Amino acid sequence: MSLARSVTEQLGRASWIRRMFEEGARLKAERGEENVCDFTLGNPDIDPPAPVLEALARLAAEHPPRIHAYMPNAGFPEAREAVARHLSGRTGLSFTPRHILMSVGSAGACNTFLRAVLDPGDEVIVLAPYFPEYFFYIQNHGGRMVPVETDANFLPVVRRIADAITPRTKVILLNTPNNPTGRVYPETLLRDLGGLVDSLDHPVTVLSDEPYTPLVFDGREHPQVVSLIRRTVIANSWSKTFALPGERIGYLAISPRLPEAGPLADACTFTTRVLGYVNAPALWQRVVARTVDVQPDISSYQRRRDRMYEGLTRLGYDVPRADGTFYLFPKSPAADDVAFVQSLLSEGVLAVPGSGFGRAGHFRLALTVPHHVIDRSLPAFRRALQSTGSS
């Protein structure tokens, strides 16, 4: 049996994140896990918040009738009601359950929306650097990804976005706080982007991918994209904020200010089903309905950011200070970021080259590791830097 040509081509550019993660598994088996510092995958190493685990235990003990049964494809009414109430309080907009679809993580929400709106050849603007799976999400549904470079501080440039818009542009995909840079897009910039979207002669919708919104440091407030840009649809999940990436639970929220909100909700309910998700996990819909207002403790991630940032800058690395998430995106001291990541690999440190995120000359570190791993990695980072002649 031959593979689909499109899949064969996609395998050739498969995610560097997964590629390096798999390389890490090989290295750990070869050298021993204690001798490898793995910064590849944003896989939280902390437990979910206590109220979430307590809600899960209560549900298991209570075992409500038909707890594992099918429900409407958009999700349990009580889960959608809880998310709508939460979003209304956070954004000042009048969300109702009609605007909410429970999803199989944020990735499921993105694919559900893109399948509902893209015709073959439609364009989706994505800001570089970007989460590499976006390319595949867009191509899954016949779309074409149009990368637009951010500035030297990884912030969007509205003029560049405007220049990239064509009659085929359907979607602008935002990710703030951003993976891989940790940058939070400021309110003034989002307002300017909203003005651009409102000025267009055909409808373009912002898809705001927001799995890291609570993970913002230094007392900052994260601007609400949906409050600042009228034509916005939110994709979100509890994977990062509740440390539940393996449970695949999230939601799609359609702004009540979208004139086509009702038909779009119907279309996304249909695409949820035909893409094979059918519905979001039943048990976890019930858990998040009870815990949607729980705020995670992000202090551990901020301490890790500070520890790695200070350690690398002392060694001589150029490290932009992340506003949020649990990533750092240092500048590669060698011109070839892939070659530099390979030199780190030889030292037992696993990172992901910036080329995989659409911005060469950097590398990404996921700080979902204990503090002692950060400390243990620094001598290896020093040796890798010295090998480039930069120190």
Image (cartoon, helix red, strand yellow):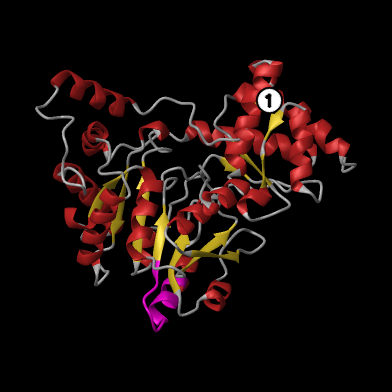
Above or below residue 343? Residue 189 is: below
Q: Regarding mark 1 in the picture, which secondary structure is present there?
A: helix
Residue 319 versus residue 26: which sits nearer the camera?
Answer: 26
- Total marks in image: 1
Q: Residue at x 32, y 25 (%)?
A: 50
Amino acid on which disc 1 is placed: Asp
Q: Is residue 315 left or right of residue 368?
A: right
Q: Residue at x 38, y 78 (%)?
A: 198
Which residues are the magenta region?
193-205
Q: Residue at x 57, y 24 (%)?
A: 370
Q: Quadrant of residue 140?
A: bottom left
Farthest residue in the bottom direction? 201
Above or below residue 54? Residue 265 is: below
Q: Is residue 151 left or right of residue 70?
A: right
Farthest residue in the front direction? 1
- Where is residue 327? Give x, y as percent: 57, 41
Q: Which residue is mark 1?
A: 375
- Where is residue 290? Give x, y as percent: 21, 35
Say if residue 317 shows up in the picture.
Answer: no
Farthest residue in the right direction? 389
Residue 9 versus residue 238: which sits nearer the camera?
Answer: 9
Residue 62 versus residue 246: which sits nearer the camera?
Answer: 246
- Where is residue 378? Give x, y as percent: 73, 29
Say if residue 58 shows up in the picture.
Answer: yes
Q: Is residue 385 magenta?
A: no
Q: Quadrant of residue 342?
A: top right
Farthest residue in the left direction? 65
Q: Is residue 201 magenta?
A: yes
Residue 128 versus residue 24: which sits nearer the camera?
Answer: 24
User: Crowdedness of circle 1 by 10 Å Cα count: few (<14), some, many (20+)?
Assistant: some
